[in-house]
Amino acid sequence: MKLLMIYASHFGYTPTIKTLNFVPEVIGGKTYKDVQVAFIQVEKEDEERVPIKKFMNFIKWLKRKNDFQTLILHSFGHLSESKADPEFTLNTLNALQDKLVNSGFEVYQTPFGYFLDLDIKAPGYSLARVFKSL
């Protein structure tokens, strides 16, 4: 699993093109203020064992650094050449969301299986952008 974490003072998305038939139709976008956005690539090797504990430890560490409560999970298949099955990826994102909510985070997901127009305003300080390979 690869993560690109971006702290955003503003994050918004609008669905443009649906790429997977098994996902529901989504109309309209959303915007958020002061959020940590997790660009996540679930890799083929994660299908053997998802690194959920490592993910949670990393998120808790980053929370101490960036002091956020709201997290956006965004499937982003551009961080590695290795890609998990789309249905496995969606199930993994849902499992991560459940774990995060149970740990007290407010969590949202961008629409899975869509190309999205993104609107991001990210401040320029040390840990506003962090890459992690789990």
Image (cartoon, helix red, strand yellow):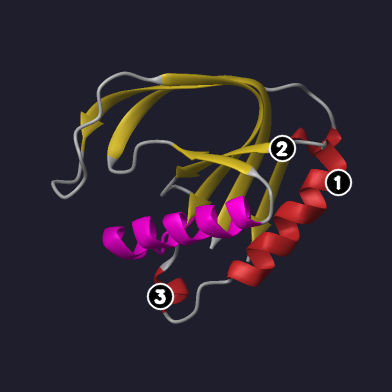
The amino acid pointed to by label 1 is Arg
Q: Which residues are magenta?
A: 80-102
Reply yes or no: does residue 132 show up in magenta. no
Secondary structure predominantly adopted by residues drawn in magenta: helix
- Horizontally, residue 117 falls left or right of residue 79, namely left
- Horizontally, residue 104 falls left or right of residue 49, namely right
Q: Secondary structure at mark 3?
A: helix
Residue holding disc 3 = 47
Which comes sooner in the sequence, label 3 or label 2?
3
Q: Are marks 1 and 2 in contact (CB under 8 Å)?
A: no
Q: Secondary structure at mark 2?
A: loop
Q: Residue at x 45, y 75 (%)?
A: 45
Q: Quadrant of residue 55?
A: bottom right
Between circles 3 and 2, the one closer to the viewer is 2
How far apart are labels 1 and 3 at the CA level? 29 Å
Q: Position of residue 94 (x, y in %)?
A: 43, 55
Residue holding disc 2 = 69
Give whichever of 95, 21 is nearer the camera: 95
Q: Residues within 10 Å of mark 3 (few under 14, many from 20)?
A: some
Q: Are marks 3 and 2 in contact (CB under 8 Å)?
A: no
User: Which quarter of the image is occupied by the C terminus?
Assistant: bottom right
Q: Quadrant of residue 28?
A: top left
The amino acid pointed to by label 3 is Glu
Q: Looking at the rendered structure, which numbered label has been put on residue 64?
A: 1
Position of residue 12 relative to residue 90, above or below, is above
How far apart are labels 1 and 2 at the CA level? 10 Å
- Horizontally, residue 26 falls left or right of residue 128, namely left
The amino acid pointed to by label 2 is Gln
Between circles 1 and 2, the one closer to the viewer is 2
Q: Residues within 10 Å of mark 2 (few under 14, many from 20)?
A: few
